[in-house]
Image (cartoon, grey):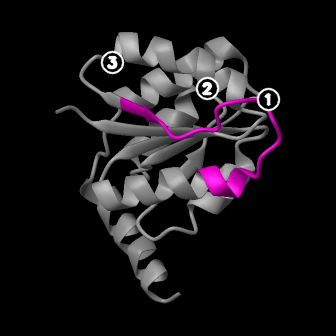
Amino acid sequence: MGTQVFVGADHAGFALKQALLPILKKEFPNFQFEDLGTHSDESVDYPDFAEKVAREVASKSARGILICGSGIGMCIAANKIKGVRAASAWDATSARLSRQHNGSNIICIGARLTGQEVANEITRVWLKSEFEGGRHQKRIDRISQLEAKK
């Protein structure tokens, strides 16, 4: 069984999610992608899908991809779930660093701000990147301490 990746989008991110998933499934055959919705472009509330993905990621030590209009709303909502480190990414560098230095387990993309090719590159780089640990681990530990203070 490969790495689980839960994917979710609101209505603004639906088309990008639909275009992205087949590419990722082909390029990353050892990953298991699960689409948690939405399944149309009818208006929905992004926190519902951010929560679905975030709870799966946190409970299964998995990874997640969230797509909304800006990538910001999904990121804010997902980060409310203990154990989630969601990051908005606008390019491959921000995606890579969010994983290597911050141990992000969810990447958030803005469909209204990010073209298809850039979104492809963001997710490719993020899925290939690993947390570097070392000097970055103490900062992740501090984030966990902040969660415990809620």
Q: Nearer the viewer, residue 98 or 67?
A: 67
Q: Earlier in the sequence, mark 3 or mark 2?
A: 2
Mark toward the viewer: 1 or 2: 2
**With respect to residue 137, does 149 lie above or below?**
below
C-alpha distance separating marks 3 and 1: 25 Å
Q: Residue at the spot x=48%, y=46% of the render?
A: 106
Q: Position of residue 127 (x, y in %)?
A: 39, 30
| Quadrant position of residue 66 | top right
Identify the residue under disc 2. 17
Q: Callout 3 environment at 10 Å: few (<14), some (14 to 19), or many (20+)?
A: some
Q: Callout 2 environment at 10 Å: few (<14), some (14 to 19), or many (20+)?
A: many
What kind of residue is marked 1? Leu
Label at residue 28: 3
Is residue 141 in the magenta section? no
Identify the residue under disc 1. 113
At numbered mark 2, what does the secondary structure look like: helix, strand or loop?
helix
Q: Earlier in the sequence, mark 3 or mark 1?
A: 3
**With respect to residue 19, does 95 lie above or below?**
below
- Can residue 85 be seen by looking at this rendering? no
Q: Are marks 1 and 2 in contact (CB under 8 Å)?
A: no
Q: Position of residue 61 (x, y in %)?
A: 29, 54
What kind of residue is marked 3? Phe
Mark toward the viewer: 3 or 2: 2
Q: Is 94 positioned to the left or the right of 61 in the image? A: right
Q: Which residues are magenta?
A: 33-49
